[in-house]
């Protein structure tokens, strides 16, 4: 089959790889009909190469049709249309019983000190072949895949794999009081959904911050108040002034480790990328190589006693944090990989009607064949051609 493989920094290629097959009784094989490029895929494209090896298959936002199931899978059958969550969880361990699916103890990558295994996401998370391919082996299919109706285009359901529940969790963690104000740093795909979900769940005012014109325009279409950060000298100060002189009740960081405007962080990431893999892994995992400009701005902008919710991915272990300010201002901080299946039952009814309250049909800007994935990665990273979200068609 054809699959997108990692070959080196900013070097991904579509190659022929062996077809997946049933290996365990709880496996399924899914024929992929749509698979998206996630913003966190760009971390692999740019920063996290030391944890990949040439030939690794990327991608963790897939959906398609069940082709085959193992004898331990009774809830699915060939022909079912499913969305595959990006994290692999068993559904029955101690963590899963508490709906902490991203920490599944059955698939935890304990050798690396990490949580549940992920599709297509480095040796840190199990080196499981990903879904930017024609077919995908799905472990723990007795629990993971989400069955969706046969009707409607893929984009109606595809984002259940990651970015829609990720945004839902971020908004839930932000815990904006009804009638309050939520600010969202970063209006990429997750940030777009955070802003829309914030409105849907009762925030009176949602302010989105970005510097890409197409992202700002998309948010405006959905009734979001926007700020172009390239026009602001003091982003936290502007937000505080804008919201009663005290700042938003909650702030979401939907950007993460590769934020713009952090030259020292970028320098550290570049330096790590020049080292041999073992040294680069140690530097990335044990030293602060994140760009923290957005996270620090979020902490400074939120009102006293407010909440900062982090959905953007960070990777350093000794990142310097403004703890005195956080403590003095009583800031609450919540974060973590999304527990996808914890939220999907709440979200699916919103996707089933014709009104599309979360605007899932207004996110994808590009749908291209899988064979054009390398060009699509470059376009997405450089934010060219108005690119906000890319869906690949195997």
Image (spheres, rainbow, N blue to C red):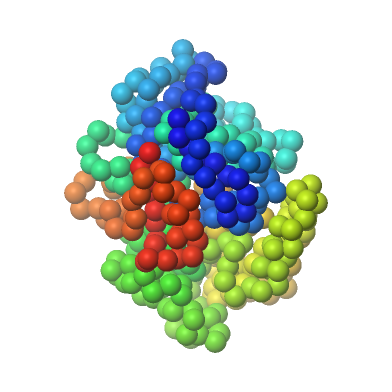
From the viewer's perspective, tell me whether residue 47 is left or right of residue 384.
right
Residue drawn where x is 30% and y is 42% of the image:
154
Residue 181, placed above or below residue 170:
below
Task: Name the residue at 70% across, 72% down.
Answer: 264
Work out whether 338 lies above or below 76.
below
- Give the vertical position of 98 relative to 139 (above or below): below
Q: Where is residue 88 shown, x and y percent of the image? A: 54, 34
Could you say where residue 236 lies in the image, as x and y percent from the top left?
A: 55, 80
Residue lying at the far top of the rendered structure: 71
Specify whether 127 is left or right of 37: right
Q: Is residue 270 above or below residue 17?
A: below
Q: Is residue 267 left or right of residue 336?
A: right
The residue located at (50%, 85%) in the rendering is 232
Q: Where is residue 243, by image quadrant?
A: bottom left
**Quadrant into which the N terminus falls:** top left
Could you tell me if residue 115 is visible in this image?
no
In the rendered image, which quarter contains the C terminus? top left
**Where is residue 375 drawn, in percent x and y?**
45, 54
Residue shown at the point (45%, 43%) measured from the top left:
61
Name the residue nearer the viewer: 380 or 111.
380
Task: Kindly tell me whether residue 261 is visible in this rendering.
Answer: yes
- Residue 307: percent from left, percent from top: 55, 65
- Residue 74 versus residue 270: which sits nearer the camera? 270
């Amino acid at each position: 089959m054809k699959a997108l493989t990692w070959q080196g920094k900013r070097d991904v290629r579509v190659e022929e790889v062996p077809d997946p097959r049933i290996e365990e009784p709880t496996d399924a094989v899914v024929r992929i009909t749509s698979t998206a490029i996630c913003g966190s895929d760009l971390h692999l494209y740019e920063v996290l190469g030391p944890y990949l090896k040439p030939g690794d298959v990327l991608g963790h936002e897939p959906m398609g049709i069940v082709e085959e199931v193992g004898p331990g899978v009774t809830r699915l059958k060939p022909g079912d249309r499913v969305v595959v969550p990006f994290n692999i969880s068993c559904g029955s361990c101690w963590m899963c019983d508490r709906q902490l699916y991203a920490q599944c103890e059955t698939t935890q990558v304990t050798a690396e000190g990490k949580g549940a295994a992920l599709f297509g996401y480095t040796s840190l998370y199990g080196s499981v072949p990903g879904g930017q391919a024609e077919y995908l082996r799905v472990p723990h299919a007795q629990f993971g895949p989400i069955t969706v109706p046969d009707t409607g285009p893929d984009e109606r359901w595809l984002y259940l794999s990651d970015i829609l529940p990720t945004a839902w969790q971020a908004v839930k963690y932000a815990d904006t009081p009804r009638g309050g104000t939520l600010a969202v740093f970063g209006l990429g795909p997750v940030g777009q959904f955070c802003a829309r979900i914030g409105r849907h769940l009762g925030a009176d005012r949602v302010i989105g911050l970005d510097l890409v014109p197409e992202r700002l325009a998309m948010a405006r279409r959905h009734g979001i108040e926007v700020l172009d950060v390239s026009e602001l000298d003091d982003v936290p100060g502007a937000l505080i002034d804008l919201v009663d002189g005290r700042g938003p009740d909650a702030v979401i960081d939907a950007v993460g480790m590769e934020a713009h405007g952090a030259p020292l962080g970028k320098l550290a990431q570049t330096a790590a990328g020049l080292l041999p893999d073992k040294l680069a892994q140690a530097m990335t995992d044990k030293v602060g190589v994140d760009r923290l400009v957005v996270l620090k701005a979020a902490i400074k902008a939120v009102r006293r006693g407010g909440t900062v919710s982090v959905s953007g991915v960070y990777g350093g272990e000794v990142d310097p944090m403004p703890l005195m300010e956080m403590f003095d201002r009583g800031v609450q901080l919540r974060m973590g990989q999304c527990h996808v299946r914890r939220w999907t039952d709440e979200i699916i009814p919103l996707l089933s009607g014709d009104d599309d309250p979360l605007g899932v049909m207004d996110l994808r800007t590009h749908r291209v064949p899988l064979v054009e994935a390398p060009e699509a990665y470059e376009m997405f990273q450089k934010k060219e051609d108005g690119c906000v979200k890319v869906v690949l068609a195997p």
